[in-house]
Image (cartoon, grey):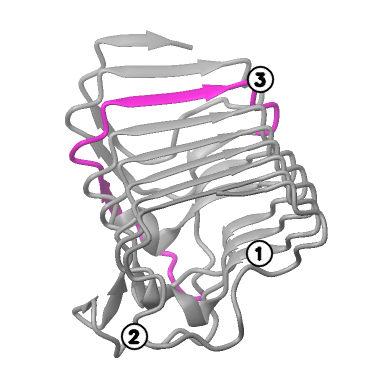
């Protein structure tokens, strides 16, 4: 746990030895008001045991994952992409956070193990998942976004990718969007969405959302509050 270190601007040294932090499973950062990012690209291949990330009350934080220049040829990569083992991500009161990922990793980094994603009071956050990350969320079960500036959940920043795509979230059971004044869509574009196990969908105080998505939506929802 890293807490109440207002002089801290960076967590990691510029260079790490091969086995640095390889046993680290849980990371919690709170009230570090000069910290700008959490994971620069040179540490991602070292954190092959990290499963839980909690970030709270960091007033200057702008980016969680910086992925520019990532080397995907490291141990732990799969099919040319570095597999990140993270399972839970919980974010709260990060008023300057603009990106969870500073750009779309386009398959070079995969977050297939994500199980729970929660974000609250992140007023500068405009979207949650880049396109390639969203396509790989095969284990995601819980998604909750509240009191944020989010305009859409999945954003397409890939130049030239305009065709309709299919997104399948095979294990997602609960979606909660609460007090999101700017939220308009789950994703723009004529994309097909499938939620075969979804049983809870809450969209509360989301006045800008006129439709969930522009494409075909398939889900068996047992409990819905819109």
Circles 2 and 3: CB atoms closer than 8 Å = no
Horizontal relation, residue 57 to residue 2: left or right? right
Please report whichever mark, 1 or 3, sits nearer to the chain's N-terminal start.
1
Q: Is residue 65 left or right of residue 134?
A: right
How far apart marks 2 and 1 lie (CA) works out to 21 Å
- In front of the other: 48 or 119: 48
For mark 2, what is the residue? 72
Along the polypeptide, which appears first: circle 2 or circle 3?
Answer: 2
User: Which residue is the site of mark 3?
Assistant: 207
Which segment is the magenta one?
159-182
Please tell me whether the stretch drawn in magenta is mainly helix, strand or loop. loop
Q: Residue at x 37, y 11 (%)?
A: 224
Q: Single out the mark in the foreground, 1 or 3.
A: 1
Q: How crowded is mark 2: few (under 14 residues within 10 Å), some or many (20 or more)?
A: some
Which mark is first along the chain, 1 or 2? 1
Q: Distance between the residues labelled 2 and 3?
A: 41 Å
- The picture places residue 180, in percent across and down from the top left corner, at 64, 27
């Amino acid at each position: 746990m890293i807490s109440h270190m207002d002089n801290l601007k960076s967590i990691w040294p510029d260079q790490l030895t091969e086995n640095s932090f390889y046993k680290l499973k849980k990371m919690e950062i709170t009230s570090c008001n000069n910290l700008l990012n959490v994971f620069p690209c040179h540490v991602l291949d070292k954190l092959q045991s990290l499963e839980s990330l909690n970030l709270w009350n960091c007033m200057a934080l702008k980016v969680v994952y910086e992925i520019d220049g990532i080397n995907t040829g490291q141990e732990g990569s799969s099919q040319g992409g570095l597999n990140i083992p993270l399972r839970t991500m919980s974010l709260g009161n990060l008023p300057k956070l603009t990106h969870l990922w500073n750009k779309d990793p386009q398959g070079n980094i995969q977050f297939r193990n994500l199980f729970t994603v929660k974000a609250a009071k992140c007023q500068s956050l405009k979207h949650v998942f880049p396109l390639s990350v969203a396509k790989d969320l095969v284990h995601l079960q819980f998604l909750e976004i509240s009191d944020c500036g989010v305009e859409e959940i999945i954003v397409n920043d890939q130049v030239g990718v305009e065709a309709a795509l299919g997104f399948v979230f095979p294990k997602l059971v609960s979606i909660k969007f609460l007090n999101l004044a700017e939220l308009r869509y789950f994703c723009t574009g004529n994309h097909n969405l499938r939620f075969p196990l979804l049983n809870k969908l809450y969209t509360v105080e989301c006045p800008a959302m006129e439709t969930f998505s522009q494409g075909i939506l398939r889900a068996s929802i047992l409990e819905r509050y819109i």
